[in-house]
Amino acid sequence: MKKRQRKKQAYKQYIRDIFEGYETMIVDPEKEKLVFHYLKEETIIYRDDDRQIRFLTRDI
């Protein structure tokens, strides 16, 4: 039970970090790229050529 709860809390923190990173990129246009990891998943928030914010999530 504890393992499942820890995993759930870690995933919630991962999602929170992604949203906070997105907000950071909105506020600070100098940020080009942020990377977040959770287990075997990686999320990259980056700016494209038009300076728009894009998300890329992939399994690693």
Image (cartoon, rainbow, N blue to C red):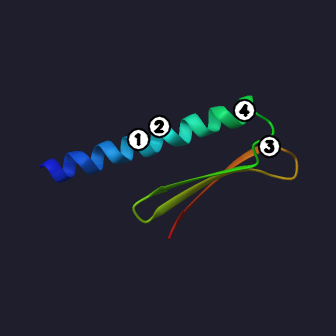
Decide: marks 1, 4 in contact (CB < 8 A)?
no
Tell me the SS state at disc 2.
helix
Three-letter amino acid code at disc 2?
Answer: Arg
Q: Depth check: give the residue in front, 55 or 36.
A: 36
Spatial CA span between label 3 and label 2: 21 Å
Task: Work out whether mark 3 precedes mark 4 in sequence or the reverse, and give the earlier one.
Answer: 4
Spatial CA span between label 1 and label 4: 20 Å
* Residue sitting at x 75%, y 33%: 28
Judged by depth in the image, the label closer to the viewer, 3 or 2, is: 2
Residue 28, compared with residue 59, is above or below; it is above
Task: Work out whether mark 3 precedes mark 2 in sequence or the reverse, and give the earlier one.
Answer: 2
Q: Which residue is mark 3?
A: 52
Spatial CA span between label 3 and label 4: 10 Å
Tell me the SS state at disc 1.
helix
Give the residue furthest to the bottom: 60
Decide: marks 1, 2 in contact (CB < 8 A)?
yes
Three-letter amino acid code at disc 1?
Answer: Gln
Q: Which residue is mark 2?
A: 16
Residue 38 image position (x, y, % from top left)? 43, 56
Residue 54 image position (x, y, % from top left)? 70, 49
Spatial CA span between label 2 and label 4: 15 Å
* Residue 26 image label: 4
Three-letter amino acid code at disc 3?
Answer: Gln
